[in-house]
Amino acid sequence: SPQLTTPYDGERSRLDLHLPTLAEYIDICKKYEKDAVLELKNAFAEEEVLEICENIEKLGYLEHVVFISFSYDNLVYLRRKYPNQPAQFLTSKYEDSLIARLKEWNLDLDIRESALTAENTAELKAAGITINCWTVDDPARAEELVGYGVDMITTNILE
């Protein structure tokens, strides 16, 4: 039988894997010339959001970062100081008030794929909103969403 070359603990967790620091993540994105997508997972105070941005700015990579968050306030804090920074509001559902909320702070959208229809995608696009959707692992659904006009698709597969 093959020998394991990667260390595991008793529960089969990979001991060689770890979450990178913010600086390590940015360095990886720089190395491979990729845009960084950074989720502000918690509801932060305004000074915390700005500190994160300032740290990335010091690394010389802020113009290559897209911020996403389920916390609308996080994105408002970001927008107050960085009015042109790419930022996407994360949500799992489409509501009639969504476009107005996004337009108020010039935000784009990162929405659960199952919430998108041809009709609401067309409404979002007509309002000038960039649409990212998550998480699409079915190629047929991905093609359907591309046909609707979504701009980005988050997936767990690379093919």
Image (cartoon, grey):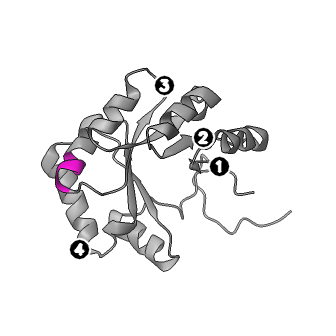
Residue at (20% x, 64% y) in the render: 54
- Stretch in magenta: 77-81
* Earlier sequence position, callout 1 versus callout 3: 3
Q: CA distance from mark 2 to mark 4?
A: 32 Å
Q: Secondary structure at mark 2?
A: loop
In the rendered image, residue 153, in percent from the top left (x then y), is placed at 60, 48
Mark 3: few/some/many CA within 10 Å (<14, 14-19, 20+): some
The local crowd at label 1, few if under 14, some if 14 to 19, many if 20 or more residues have their Cα within 10 Å, is: few
Task: Residue under label 2, please give it.
Answer: 135
Residue located beneath label 1 in the image: 156
In the rendered image, is residue 117 in sight?
no
The verdict on residue 130 being magenta is no
Q: Nearer the viewer, residue 99 or 132?
A: 99
Cα–Cα gap, marks 3 and 4? 36 Å
Residue pointed to by mark 3:
94
**Which amino acid lies under the numbered mark 1 shown in the image of this protein?**
Asn
**Looking at the picture, does residue 5 appear above or below residue 118?**
below
The answer to whether marks 1 and 3 mark residues whose Cβ atoms lie closer than 8 Å is: no
Real-space CA distance between mark 4 and mark 1, rounded to the nearest whole angstrom: 31 Å
**Disc 4 target residue:** 58
Q: Are marks 2 and 1 in contact (CB under 8 Å)?
A: yes
**Left or right: where does residue 75 sit relative to residue 65?**
left
Mark 3 or 2, nearer chain start: 3
Question: What's the CA distance linking mark 1 and mark 3?
Answer: 23 Å
Outermost residue on the front side: it is 126
Q: Nearer the viewer, residue 103 or 52?
A: 103
